Image (tube, rainbow, N blue to C red):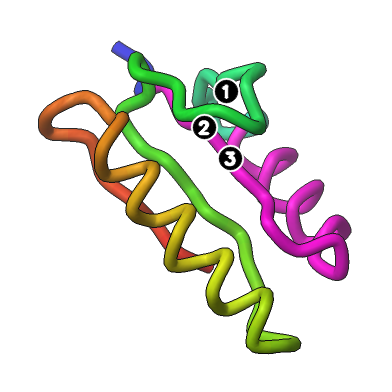
Amino acid sequence: MSQKIQIIISCDRRVLELEQVKNWLIENGYSLSNNHYHVDKTADIIILITCGVTQMHEDFTFKMLEKIKAGMKPGAQIILG
């Protein structure tokens, strides 16, 4: 059974990396969530792609991590990149 993966991006500077990650996941048989803005409660793995360019970006990242933790399904994993 394929794991469902959600990718959330919180940094516009990382769009190229996002596309590279998405392509690799698709090529390796992973199922991707179409939801990029709200926590997908069916995802097995949630990848948060972020950056620390400014304090505002860092603060947003920590807020997003809390939102993900509160909304993800039990047993799901978070990968921070």
Q: In the image, what residue occupies the spot 57% across and 79% down?
A: 58
Number of numbered discs on residues: 3
Write down the residue under mark 1.
32
Q: Which residues are magenta?
A: 4-25
> Quick check: marks 1 and 2 in contact, CB under 8 Å?
yes
Instruction: Tell me the SS state at disc 2.
Output: strand
Instruction: Tell me the SS state at disc 3.
Output: strand
Looking at the picture, how far across and down is residue 61, in whole percent?
53, 66
Write down the residue under mark 3.
7
Quarter location, residue 69: top left
- Mark 3 is on which residue type? Ile
Q: Residues within 10 Å of mark 2 (few under 14, many from 20)?
A: many
- Mark 1 is on which residue type? Leu
Q: Which mark is residue 6?
A: 2
Q: Which mark is residue 22?
A: none
Choose between 27 and 55: the one closer to the eye.
55
